[in-house]
Image (cartoon, rainbow, N blue to C red):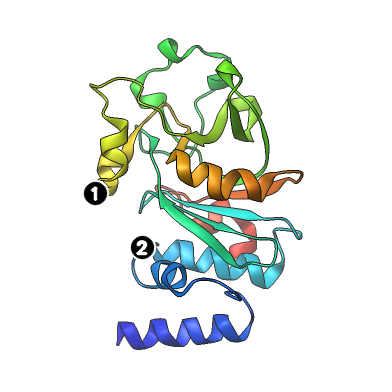
Amino acid sequence: MQSRKLRGWAAAALAAGLFAAVPLHAEERLLAGAASDEARQIVGRVTATGDNHGMPFVVVDKKAAMVFVFDARGALVGDSSVLLGLARGDDSAPGIGDKKLSEIRPEERTTPAGRFVASLGYGLGKQDILWVDYDTSLALHRVSSVSTKEGRLQRMVSTSPLDRRITFGCINVPAAFYDRVIHPMFTATNGVVYILPETKPVAEVFDFHA
């Protein structure tokens, strides 16, 4: 029954042009288990309402610890596992953007949910990153091996979403994925990043979802 439902959703999406020119494996990953139900619903609502305003958009699925990247027309360009904030929660801690990393307590290391207009920029060390929310120092960037104890590179390939909760709040993606998908998609343009909640109802975070 579930597979029949997914095939029906996929057929409707294809008819609407949602997945035009998308590799089949990427479409299947979005529809058949890689994404949560909420992520699939948000993608449908974004494309139905035009909430991305003709810009590329990204859906960060915190429950699945996955990211899905779409072009301005709503075609799925790529997906990847991600590393997310250590702590569960959908809000940024007060004043988090002004703190040094060493001052951020474990319970403050959340990846906040919401709709953000993102653009490429530079972080510490002058490495290019995608600024999701500059005021709270929230960014999407290449994963780096911070320490052997953290094992971020090993966590990235884990099949368990729980293993991918380790960052101070930023969204880490494989370097190859950043270079191949994120950077080209956001070069010379802004885009929208939708970070799905994990403790709040989706409709509370995204009013267009109602």
Disc 1 and disc 2 in contact, CB within 8 angstroms: no
Quadrant location of the C terminus in the rendered image: bottom right
Return the mark for residue 160.
1
Q: Nearer the viewer, residue 199 or 64?
A: 64
Residue 140 location (% of width, % of height): 53, 37
Location of residue 174 with respect to 121 vertically, above or below = below
- Name the secondary structure under disc 2: loop
Q: Please indicate whether residue 99 sits to the left or right of residue 192 in the image.
A: left
Identify whether 49 is placed above or below 6.
Answer: above
Image point (46%, 38%), residue name: 175
106, above or below 28, in the image: above
Is residue 63 rendered to the left or right of residue 77? left
User: What amino acid does circle 1 point to?
Assistant: Ser
C-alpha gap between disc 1 and disc 2: 12 Å
Q: Earlier in the sequence, mark 1 or mark 2?
A: 2
**Drawn side of residue 187 relative to residue 193, left or right:** right
Tag 2 residue: 34
Q: Which label sits on residue 96?
A: none
- Note whether 164 is above or below 76 in the view shown: above
Q: Nearer the viewer, residue 177 or 133?
A: 177
- Residue 128 placement: quadrant: top right
**Residue 144 location, quadrant:** top left
| Residue type at tag 2 | Ala
